[in-house]
Image (spheres, grey):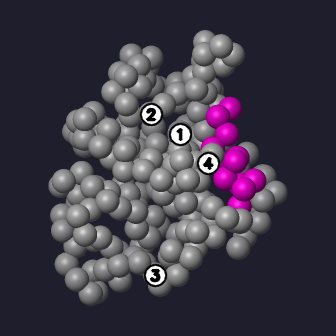
Amino acid sequence: MAQEEQILREDNFKDRYIQWFATHEDARSKLNERDIKLRDELRSFSYRILNSWEKGGLFDAERGAKGKGWRLFSFIDLVWLLLIRDLRNFGISLQDIQHIYQQLTFDAKKVSPSRMPLLEFFVAQYLSERQAIYLLIFSDFSVEFATQFDLDNTRNHKSLTNHISLSFHYVINEKKIERKLKEMKEMKEMKALMEH
């Protein structure tokens, strides 16, 4: 994360974060289930690009039986691939994106099946509350997630350093992942989470 936290969060953030990992196992499993072939969802990503990103350590792919066949991705993986694409469109190098990826996977062993716990938490929060959520990338390539409330609160109390801001709204609501998003919304626990 940033040298010192840039974002002033809601008082109950830590409790909500811990509660997500303690109580939403079915929803977490569904968000992280690697059952999506990119030929179905993101045909615009060429094999050359995916191979380069995978070799560069920007994601870890799972393949079918015996490690052969199509790469399989989860909903969280799809969101991350779209974020990589957007970061590349801003001219962020593969090395700097790899640094961002390492920050997103920092706590993954503690909260299996999550590979990117913070990303998972904020994707779930976006899906359940439909509030604006952003991935903020600072000049040292440290990252923070923030809700609109967090950003407004931070700006009212202190200065926020320059950063690039990527909106979950535009990433998650892309036509490319619309079918998978619909499946997520139909899942019983995810429905309950979204109605919360």
Question: In this picture, is 79 found above or below 46?
Answer: below
Magenta stretch, residue numbers: 24-35
User: Who comes first in sequence, dot 3 or dot 4?
Assistant: 3
Nearer-the-camera pick, 42 or 16: 16
Which element type, helix, strand or loop, lies under badge 2? loop
Secondary structure under tag 1 reads: helix
Residues at marks 3 and 2, CA–CA distance in whole angstroms: 30 Å
The CA distance from mark 2 to mark 1 is 8 Å
User: Pointer 3: residues within 10 angstroms few (<14), some, or many (20+)?
Assistant: few
Cα separation, mark 3 vs mark 4, equals 25 Å
* Residue identified by numbered label 1: 77
Residue 126 to residue 185: above or below: below
Where is residue 38 shown, x and y percent of the image?
A: 57, 26
Residue 89 seen by the camera: no
Marked residue nearer the N-terminal end (3 or 2): 3
Q: Residues within 10 Å of mark 4 (few under 14, many from 20)?
A: some
The total of numbered circles placed on residues is: 4
Residue denoted by label 4: 112
Q: Amino acid at mark 1?
A: Asp
Disc 4 residue type (three-letter): Ser
Ranked by sequence position, the earlier of labels 1 and 3 is: 3
Q: Are marks 1 and 4 in contact (CB under 8 Å)?
A: no
x and y, in percent, of residue 157 in the image = 27, 87
The residue carrying mark 3 is 10
